[in-house]
Every structure is written in structure tokens, then in C-alpha cells.
Amino acid sequence: MGILLQSVRARDNSEIHMLGVKEPLTWVNTSEGLVIDISQQLQDPAKRPCQHAWAFKIVQGQPNEFASAPRVAYQGPPAADQETFTFISRTKSGQIRFTTDGEVPTGASRLYTGPITLPKGTIVKARAFKQGFLASDVVTAVAGTLRVNFQTQNAPVPPGYLADTGKPFGPRESGLTYGWSTDQTKETRWRSDDVVLGTCCELKAGQKWEIALPRGWYKVLVCIGDADYGSENTINVEGVNYCRNLVMDNVGQTRGIHKRIYLEDGKLTIDNGKSKNRRTKINHVHITPLQQSL
């Protein structure tokens, strides 16, 4: 015998009990509502605790699906003292909550409702929430991070990035000075509409990319890979090895690797050391200044 509770649904992994009965009952969600199976024994009013009504307790199970982490978008290159962020929800009907004090966002954290402008150096953490779902992974961004995308000259520049099109080291319109040891414009590629991951420049043996920056500590993220072909990557930043002969043969496979780097000579240098492989592909680099006490 089954009892239908119209317009009622139980979450996966839930337990349903008849009040006063220890063993859980079997149940199923249907298009009309929740159907609870009543054993033959409990159909006898004299053998159930409540003889004049059906009384049930639903112990809701824990959700087993995560909300999708929000995506961070940048309004433009960071200004001297601040930067504006936009967070994009990838969970339908979900909420994004964020913090700027380094703490992990909770359901009680500040609700994101539109672009936020933060002082340089502020760490913003964002997370997606939705009823019935587990909270998403945390997305972290730092205001004032310098982002350089390696791309062809005709590819659109992603919002929040500066473009490197393979030109030799020298001053750029942004006021920064960066570039390659020799002209690498013929080594740039534009593979897909996702310009951040779909463009790259081949880092050949003996070549290096540099950017002039003040002496100090930085967190440097380097993203490597090729959107259309396999790659075999060796990357060093200021002589610190990030990866050595890292093979990524799946189409579209990319990987971001970050480390804390101390810059001594005023030029941040990326190269592949003495590696002779010709398949190192660099997509973009993020450079975040750290407090000098670190």
C-alpha cells in the first residue's frame, strides 16, 4: 500500500519514518508527489503507534551536487590604486556571496549584486550558493594583478588583460615595458573564441620573455598549453622551475601553475632554460605584487 503526499518531494538520501517506528520506510518521488510505501503490518491500526492518522517524519538527506563556481571577469586593466571586478554566476537561480577579509564566503556573507571596485592589493573571494546544492568551490582574485595575454595581433584583447603579440622587449602604450628577446610575432597563435585560453605563443629554446617591474616578491601564475594541439612544456620564472617536459596531449588541455617569486634585478624573466623541445606554449601570465614582509 502506498500513500501519496501531493506536492511533496524528498531530497535524495532522505529517510522517512512513521512516528514511533524505528525502521525507515521505502519511498519514491513521482510527478504527483511523494509516495510512501506502508508495510502490511503497519496498515493495521492496532499495530502502529498512531491509530487515527498517518504521522511521518522526513529526515532530509544531504545534497550531493555542488553549485558551479562563479567566473571572475575584469572590467579593464587595473588602475594605479584600484580595480573593478564582475562575477558571473554559472548556477541558474543561484546567489554569489563574497568576502574581502580573506575569509571563505558563507551563506551569510555579502551578497554580490553587481560590479565591485576594490583597492589595490585587496583579496576578494567569491562562492556560489543555491538551495538544495552544496556550496561551490571558492574563486579568488586580487585587485591590482597584472595580466598579460599572449596572442596574435588581430585577436581581441580580453577585458582586464594587456596583449603581448610577440614583439621584442620595449615600452608599450600601457606605460609598461615588456616583450621578447627577439621578434616572436610569427610564433603567436589564435585557436578559438576563448581568447584567454585559445591564444598562445611558442616559447622556443634560447628565447625569453621579460617585463620590467620593481624589486620585490610576486605571485606569478603562468598558463600553458595549446587549444588545438598537444604541447610539451618547460617553464622557468626567474630561474625557478614551474614544469619540465610536461606533456599535455589532449586537445584544448591547458594548465595554470603559480609560485611565489622574488624579483631582484628589475626584470621578471620567463624562459625554458636549456630545454630543446619546441612544444612549449604559453597562454597568459598573472603577476600579483605581494607585501614585502612576506
Image (cartoon, grey):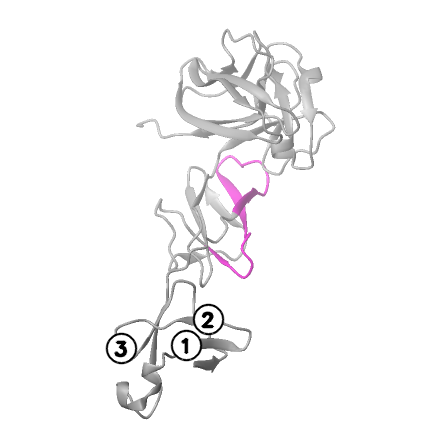
What is the magenta range? 71-96
Q: Residue furthest bottom?
A: 52
Sooner in the amino-acid sequence: mark 2 or mark 1: 2
Instruction: Kindly identify the amino acid type of the residue bearing the numbered disc 1.
Output: Asp
Residue situated in front as seen by the camera: 77 or 63: 63
Q: Position of residue 83 (x, y in %)?
A: 51, 41
Secondary structure beneath dot 2 equals strand
Q: In the rendered image of this protein, does residue 97 appear above or below residue 16?
A: above
Mark 3 or mark 2: whose residue is earlier in sequence: 3
Question: Which residue does the image show at 51% across and 34% down from the upper left?
Answer: 80
Instruction: Find disc 1 in the rendering and name its residue.
Output: 37
- Any magenta on residue 168? no
Q: Amino acid at mark 2?
A: Val
Q: Which residue is mark 3?
A: 21
User: Residue 57, relative to residue 45: is it above or below?
Assistant: above
Circle 2 residues within 10 Å: few <14, some 14–19, many ≥20: some
Name which residue type carries label 3: Val
Question: What numbered label is drawn on residue 84?
Answer: none
- Callout 1: SS: strand
Q: Nearer the viewer, residue 294 or 246?
A: 246
Whether tag 2 and tag 1 are in contact, CB under 8 A, the answer is yes
Q: Position of residue 193 (x, y in %)?
A: 69, 37
Check disc 2 and report the residue beneath it: 28
